[in-house]
Amino acid sequence: MAKQLHVEVVAVEKKVWSGDAEMVVARTTEGELGVLPGHAPLLGQLKEPSQVRVKLAGGEQLTWDVTGGFLSITGDGVTVLAEEAATAAPATAAH
């Protein structure tokens, strides 16, 4: 089994989601950032508005529209601390 990241998505009022994932993609004020297991520690300010995408084992992807906040990467995993986080509408696949 591939190594996983422990991810927490937290908004001001509540914990939105917590679990293990293969990758996290977030847009910071410095640009889009993909986080894989073993990523160097980092603290980034989330661009607003933007999206945070969490890619799970098996190909499923969870997406939230976020406003404000920070992305924290440590040896323990990734925490998204957003002012607001709402589940994004699913993208439609092109056929």
Image (cartoon, rainbow, N blue to C red):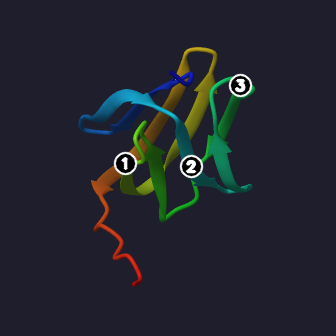
Q: Earlier in the sequence, mark 2 or mark 1?
A: 2
Q: Which mark's residue is nearer the viewer, 2 or 3?
A: 2
Task: Tell me the element at label 2.
Answer: strand
Label 3, label 1: how far apart the Cα atoms are: 25 Å
Q: Quadrant of residue 47?
A: bottom right
Q: Residue furthest bottom?
A: 95
Q: Which residue is mark 1?
A: 60
Q: Is residue 51 above or below residue 82?
A: below
Residue 53 drawn at (x, y percent) = 46, 51
| Residue type, label 3 | Pro
Residue 41: mark: 3
Secondary element at tag 3: loop
Label located before the other in sequence (2 or 3) = 2
Q: Residues within 10 Å of mark 3 (few under 14, many from 20)?
A: few
Toward the top, the furthest residue is: 76
Q: Quadrant of the C terminus?
A: bottom left
Residue at the spot 75% in from the left edge and 26% down from the top edge: 40
Q: Which residue is mark 2?
A: 25
Residue drawn at x 33%, y 29% as measured from the top left: 18
CA gap between label 2 and label 3 equals 15 Å
